[in-house]
Amino acid sequence: MKRFLLPFLLLSEVLLSQVCFSTVDDLSFLVISHLKSASDVTIVAYSIDPEYLGLKSPEMVVEVPVEGAFVHISEGLLHSKFIVLDHETVIFGSANFNRSSLEEHLNNLIVFHSEEIASFFENIYDWLVFGKKPQAQLKTKEGKFFLIPVVDGEKIVLDALWKAKRYVLLCSYAFTDEDVFATLKFLSSRGVEIYIITDEWFESSRLRDFPLGTFHVLEVKEPLMHHKFLVVDGKYLITGSANFTESGFHRNVEVMFETSNREYVESFVEEFDRIWRGYFVQGVRF
């Protein structure tokens, strides 16, 4: 029975968009099983472990040098994380493609099955390797994709925040962006409930010097909290590879995904709730 079940599961993952979280899903299995079934693979990521992934001859662009990959060199980091399979499937999210990121850290990955979305991501590879003009953004039925630094990531986040009427959920590794923080302070003064899950970067940043006021903050100590997402009023979601930092919004090579798709939004609200309630991690609240 198991022989027939695995191909069915893989087929389901390819045909349907799928949101996965390390708190409840095996991200390692998700990535490696898709790679095994693909004949054409393109990877762009900050860090890749080809041996761990069982890669044979993929096209790769990396920030951290690895044998066989094109190494990105520019002012900002290559910080995006995505895989394109057979020109039609994309695995994209907060996780780097190595053992620790997929198995140990708090991360998310979304699987899209769309030639249109795959083409957008393949254009990023062509931009990084061949210098071709990239596509700055893409609007699809799934949501909107934005390429940073071609697009101002901070503006996208701030525009979403100004829609907040009831609450904001912000879950981000290395949250240090002062404009986002100031906007959250203003929203809080208007009665919007602000919930933040972050990591030890926040404790050592300038933001920690400012009064937190009515903010609800959870600083996750372990495992490494590597998510990057924002939910506004349970209606809007922004996620992707960009940390909520000045460099993440303006200098690094990042991909940001914005959507009001109810299934995506609700899945990230549930993930925020899992972490906030301490089902999987230990943290410190302020």
Image (spheres, rainbow, N blue to C red):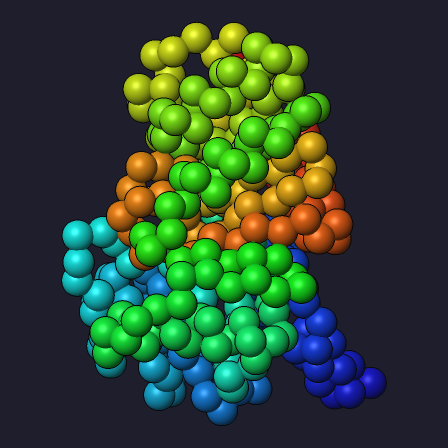
In this view, 216 is above or below 245: above
- Farthest residue in the bottom direction? 39
Taking the spot 30% from the left edge, 19% from the top edge, the residue there is: 206
Q: Quadrant of residue 253?
A: bottom left
Q: Is 271 on the left or on the right of 59, as rendered? A: right
Q: Position of residue 36 (x, y in %)?
A: 53, 84
Taking the spot 25% from the left edge, 61% from the top edge, the residue there is: 63
In this view, 198 is above or below 152: above
The reply to whether residue 251 is in sight is yes
Question: Quarter holding the N terminus?
Answer: bottom right
Q: Position of residue 247 (x, y in %)?
A: 29, 42
Q: Is 57 on the left or on the right of 27, as rendered? A: left
- Farthest residue in the right direction? 1
Q: Position of residue 267 (x, y in %)?
A: 70, 48
Taking the spot 17% from the left edge, 62% from the top edge, the residue there is: 73
Q: Quadrant of residue 20?
A: bottom right
Q: Quadrant of residue 214?
A: top right
The reply to whether residue 34 is in sight is no
Q: Position of residue 71 (x, y in %)?
A: 21, 69
Q: Is 180 on the left or on the right of 144, as rendered? A: left
In this view, 257 is above or below 200: below
Q: Is 62 on the left or on the right of 80, as rendered? A: left
